Image (cartoon, helix red, strand yellow):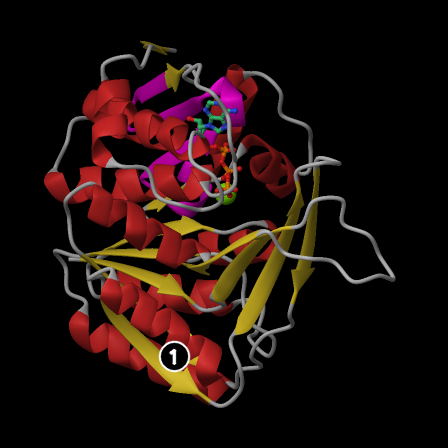
Amino acid sequence: MIYTVTLNPALDKTVEIPSLTVDSVNRITAMRTDPGGKGINVSKVIQKLGRESVAAGILGGSTGRAIASALEAMELRTGFWFVEGETRTNLKVIDPVNHTNTDLNEPGITVSEEILKGLLQELLLQVDREDIVVLSGSLPKGAPEDTYGTWVKACRETGAKVILDVDGKLLQAGIEASPYLIKPNNHELSVLMGRELGTPEELEKAARQLMEQHHIAKVVVSMGGAGALYIAGEETIYAEGLKVPVKSTVGAGDSVVAALAAAEEAGMSMEDTVRLSMACGAANVMCSGTQAAEYDVIEELVSKVVFRYL
Ligand SMILES: Nc1ncnc2c1ncn2[C@@H]1O[C@H](COP(=O)(O)OP(=O)(O)OP(=O)(O)O)[C@@H](O)[C@H]1O
Ligand SMILES: [Mg+2]
């Protein structure tokens, strides 16, 4: 089983307001709400790939209940902890006339160490060595900075493979505990290494340094429209980005992570993993918001992926 963990989920509310104006009444012409947060996005894509996952995490209040019921309506398996407080709603205002995107993000729930410990203990009761745990996204207020270090270590000790997709100080803390796979983008890897990494060769060298230093088995470095690098064992593959019409690049990385988890569970070869995950990333950017792409779109892109060994 694949478990995804979203410690700081959000209800993503996207509204369309032509000619948005401050200090005046604005009329919404279209709106939609989607359960969001990186782990939840990963679970949605895993489902499109025809595999199962359990989406775990922390929810609160009526917004939390709305997220849980939306996920259940999508027939996703969930394992959320309900706590005091209100899960955040992130409002995205799209103005199709002035071509602007305005985000209004709520602060969300503040958690205690007891809540985090309780959720982790519950997860550990379910996870075993055949499983994959995907840890991704920001932390709620109140969570210590080394939370992902604690979670990676605890999950790894069950024998499960841990995939970590977080950035900044959270990534630094998480890699200390030797996750199985990390998927930074090129900017996140540059920040982590404290220097600008431009070429695939520079990125590969940095990734190998981390793999050796922190006993990480696999690193995938995504590079937006420029594709991604896959580094495992002696092998390094550079895959070009697919040329597709771009609607929204939000969550492209989450789609790649979903494919990596699905491919790992299915025991796919490195080359097939490259094909599936690049197709998933590209199919995601063809969709608006954080909507998960349909499998037939992904399938059609799989054969178009171009890659070479470095
Ligand atoms: N403009 C684009 N055109 C084609 N493919 C893209 C584009 N942007 C992203 N992708 C695909 O999606 C993958 C992941 O994108 P990216 O490197 O931007 O992830 P990310 O920065 O982690 O995104 P996020 O964290 O917002 O989900 C890329 O490796 C590529 O395959
Ligand atoms: Mg990302």
Q: Is residue 229 magenta?
A: yes
| Placement of 304 over or under 11, stated as above or below | above
Q: Is residue 208 magenta?
A: no
**Which residue is at the front of the view, 260 or 92?**
92
The stretch in magenta equals: 211-237
- Residue 237: horizontal and vertical position, in percent? 35, 18
| Residue 297 is at least partly visible in this image | yes
Q: Residue shown at 22%/61% (left/top)?
A: 76
**Which residue is at the front of the view, 155 or 240?**
240
Q: Residue shown at 39%/31% (left/top)?
A: 281
Q: From the viewer's perspective, is 303 left or right of 68?
A: left
Q: From the viewer's perspective, is 168 left or right of 223?
A: right
| Placement of 82 over or under 143, stated as above or below | below
Mark 1 within 8 Å of ligand 1, using the beta carbon: no
| Residue 205 is at least partly visible in this image | no
Neighbourhood count class around disc 1 (C-alpha, 10 Å): few under 14, some 14–19, many 20 upward? some
Label 1: element kind: helix
Say which residue label 1 marks.
65
**Which residue is at the front of the view, 176 or 229?**
229
Say which quarter of the image contains residue 135: bottom left
**Which residue is at the front of the view, 277 or 291?**
291
Total numbered badges shown on the rendered structure: 1
Q: Is the N terminus in the top left, top right, bottom left or bottom right quadrant?
A: bottom left
- Residue 65: horizontal and vertical position, in percent? 38, 79
Q: From the viewer's perspective, is 241 left or right of 133?
A: right
Q: Amino acid at mark 1?
A: Arg
